[in-house]
Image (cartoon, rainbow, N blue to C red):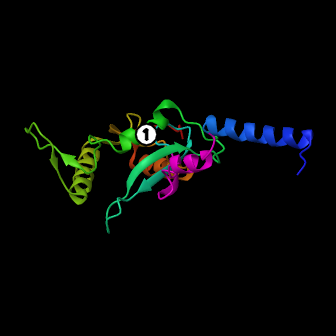
Amino acid sequence: MAVTRRQFMKVSAAGLAASSVGALGFIGASEGLAAGVRPFRLEKTTETRNTCPYCAVGCGVLVYSSADGAKGSKARLVHIEGDSDNPINRGTLCARGAASLGFANSVNRLQYPMHRKPGSDKFERVSWDFAMERIAKLAKEDRDKNFIAKNRDGVTVNRWVSTGFLAGSACSNEAGYLTYKAIRSTGILALENQARI
């Protein structure tokens, strides 16, 4: 069989290329790459859209939670990131918003009502019913004692100046409006809200 010079050069070039690829470690590269790829860590989590709780800007966040697999286990937050579909922050977060996973999973986070009895030096865990009843009782006592129905000139003012209310900033406009109306209806003048409603 006669081999032309052109055929010999083609076979030689192909052999040289194949041996060079093998010598540089590219043979089996796709298999090695596939073996080294880890599964996406958020693949089996539940994604929830929410609003960042830190200030009145209202940045959108995506919260990812995952249960440990045991039946009936409580879901735990595993990742928080900016929501790129949110028109306010377009996926970006400030340093506090980006670090919110740390405070959400903190062992120091208060998770239930605590009460310190008069004269005691420690807080004790109480039920929500106890906490709400105690707040309502003390608020009623304070309002009855310090409510100002009329000023010195006899003009009706209906003021309760001995108590203030601090509202949250992560509420919607509607929730802020209802908060304003409810608190003002009691006569409280000292209402503070980051959203400046």
Pick whichever, 142 or 96, lies toward us.
96
| Horizontal side, residue 171 vs residue 3: left or right | left
- Residue 48 screen position, x and y as percent: 51, 55
Residue 17 in which image quadrant: top right
- Find disc 1 in the rendering and name its residue: 100
Q: Nearer the viewer, residue 88 or 7?
A: 7
> Is 28 a magenta residue?
yes
SS class of the residue under badge 1?
helix
Q: Start and end of the magenta stretch? A: 26-51
Task: Kindly identify the residue that appears in the image at 91 percent across and 39 percent down.
Answer: 5
Q: Measured from the top left, where is residue 143 in percent x and y?
A: 29, 46
**In the shown orientation, is residue 165 left or right of residue 15?**
left
Q: What residue type is labelled 1?
A: Ser
Can residue 150 be seen by looking at this rendering?
no
Q: Can residue 43 be seen in this view?
A: yes
- Relative to 170, say whether 98 is above or below: above
Q: In which quarter of the image is the C terminus?
A: top right
Residue 45 located within the stretch drawn in magenta: yes
Residue at image point 39% right, 49% down: 186
